[in-house]
Image (tube, rainbow, N blue to C red):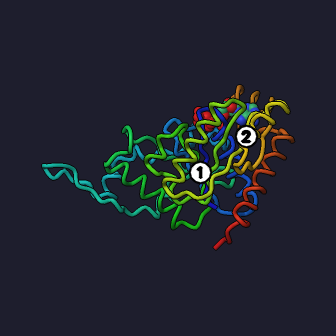
Amino acid sequence: MKLAIVGKGGVGKTTLAAALARRLAAAGRSVVAVDADPDGNLAAALGVAEAFTPEPIAGMRELILDRTDAKDQGGGLMFKLNPKVDDLPEKFSVDAGGVRLLVLGTVETGGKGCMCPEGALLKALLQYLLLRGKDDVVLDMEAGLEHMGRASARGVDALIAVVEPGMRSVQTAARIQKLAADIGIERTCVVANQVKEADQRERLERALSGQTILGVLPYSEALARADLEGRSSDVEDAALGEAIEQVGEALENELGGLPKIT
Ligand SMILES: Nc1ncnc2c1ncn2[C@@H]1O[C@H](COP(=O)(O)OP(=O)(O)OP(=O)(O)O)[C@@H](O)[C@H]1O
Ligand SMILES: [Mg+2]
């Protein structure tokens, strides 16, 4: 199962990405959780201490130059667009309680992505994970729309837009979903998060009518407290756990079951 989690800033993308990755691992599947947010904190959400968080691939200059065979040819930089990447997930991920965590990091660029060795390597790595790799993949994306221009999530089985009570997050989700269709992502779904009251739930469901809502996650005092104390990975909240389980099941139904482990 290949998933990308998207949405407005602060809606709960990383929280959901970590929870879905853990759930897949608990079912005995091989999962790579990819922090594709330049300002990411998926490691913390998976309970990986800072000292053990992997170095971002985008910062591995030697590796990038070596794999892309980048050479300054006087008139400009020449490099391979299809570098070897199939060994990188194994080499540069760390184990996070049964989930393998890979951190992509930042390519200094604006707009539509950069034609540079770093960009080429990251793109090749994502395409490998999504199109050829056998592992389940959960991509924790950067907030907003910009990454859609780079088509980083092309090839996912489902794009999951997280929304919170508030129409701005619903609008961001709608924009992302439209762009997803433009790059050929056929299945987009929504998860509502941080919902405190029935009224919020009803309003969100109305605003999202016509879309596939995988589930509604309640606001969790326990999670908020845990984050304040810097331990956002080990939260005991039965209602939240149950709602995440339902999201996982709804997703499996939507995809017609989990892909076979090969
Ligand atoms: N259901 C919830 N109940 C309470 N707090 C939550 C819930 N979901 C997420 N949070 C908290 O909200 C904050 C933002 O969550 P998270 O980091 O998952 O969002 P994000 O969309 O990944 O943010 P960013 O755009 O910065 O990457 C965190 O402090 C997280 O602990
Ligand atoms: Mg995040």
**Would residue 127 be visible to someone looking at this image?**
yes
Q: Quadrant of ligand 1?
A: top right
Question: Which secondary structure, mark 1?
Answer: strand
- Dot 2 surroundings within 10 Å: few (below 14), some, or many (20 or more)? many
Q: Position of residue 107 (x, y in %)?
A: 39, 42
Q: Nearer the viewer, residue 2 or 66?
A: 2
Q: Is residue 244 left or right of residue 187?
A: right
- Dot 1 surroundings within 10 Å: few (below 14), some, or many (20 or more)? many
First in sequence: mark 1 vs mark 2: 1
Question: Which secondary structure, mark 2?
Answer: strand
Q: Is residue 84 above or below residue 181?
A: below
Q: Quadrant of the N terminus?
A: bottom right
Among the 4 quarters of the image, the one containing residue 221? top right
Q: Quadrant of the C terminus?
A: bottom right
Q: Residue at position x 31%, y 48% from top?
A: 116
> Which mark identifies residue 4?
1
Q: Residue at position x 38%, y 39% from top?
A: 111
Say which amino acid is labelled 2: Ala
Q: Residue at position x 13%, y 49% from top?
A: 74
Q: Residue at position x 27%, y 56% from top?
A: 79
**Would residue 231 be visible to someone looking at this image?**
no
> Which mark identifies residue 192?
2
Say which amino acid is labelled 1: Ala
